[in-house]
Image (cartoon, rainbow, N blue to C red):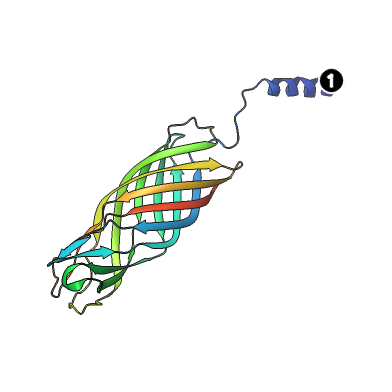
Amino acid sequence: MKLMKTLIAGAVSMAFLPAVPAFAYEAGDIIVKAGVINVIPKDGNAEVGNSELDIDSDIQLGLTGVYMVSDKIGIELLAATPFTHTAEGDGGDIDGVDVITTKHLPPTLSAQFYPMDAASKIQPYVGLGVNYTFFFDEEDDAGLGSNGLKPSFGLAYSAGVDYMVNDNWLVNASVWKVDIDTEVKGGAADGLDVEIDPVAFMVACGYKF
């Protein structure tokens, strides 16, 4: 009987404790996301004589990892499988001509701010970070004697929203605006400034540890 009274008293006490949903974002949480990411460079990426260069977009597998420093602040690392882009002449003497094809990886490290209550199932956020983009496997399609493109450092601005499906699984939509400026190395176009400055969109599923 004494044991029964103790159990009942414990159950009543727990019933009056404030409810803390399991989906709360807390310091120490690790959130991993994987999905489809589309990198779309701006138009008019470089000027070549009486022509411009336009770089096409590409879709790859995007990966992000977030470590929650607190219930409001997270640190995110963005990675992806290599993107492939071709720069094509737009107007003038090289209109429609493929000039250079390159692959690149754009790892980006950002600090994020989550304004909602930590227990909310919907978690919008904004971020500010730094991007490092390096280029490889360049193809000199136009025979300009180029040795590729220089690496780029620049700022990255981001925003997104997580929706917790249950205690651990979530879906995410996010966008980045990245400052990527590079130069052609060697050949007839040596020193040519190329401003890529893409917008990247990602739709992903994630898991919170």
Which element type, helix, strand or loop, lies under badge 1?
helix
Q: Is residue 13 above or below residue 73?
A: above
The residue lying at 33 percent from left, 58 percent from top is: 106
Amino acid marked by disc 1: Lys
Tell me where residue 92 appears, x and y as whole percent: 16, 69
How many dots with numbers? 1
Left or right position of 183 against 105: left
- Note whether 115 is above or below 196 in the view shown: above
| Snapshot quadrant of residue 181 | bottom left
- In this rendered view, identify the residue nearer to me: 150 or 172: 172
Q: Quadrant of the N terminus?
A: top right
Few, some or many C-alpha atoms within 10 Å of disc 1 (few <14, some 14-19, many ≥20)?
A: few
What percent of the width, then of the height, locates residue 130? Answer: 29, 49
Say which residue label 1 marks.
Answer: 2
- In terms of depth relative to the viewer, which is nearer, 197 or 136? 197
Please tell me which residue is depicted at 36% across the width and 42% down the height of the picture.
127
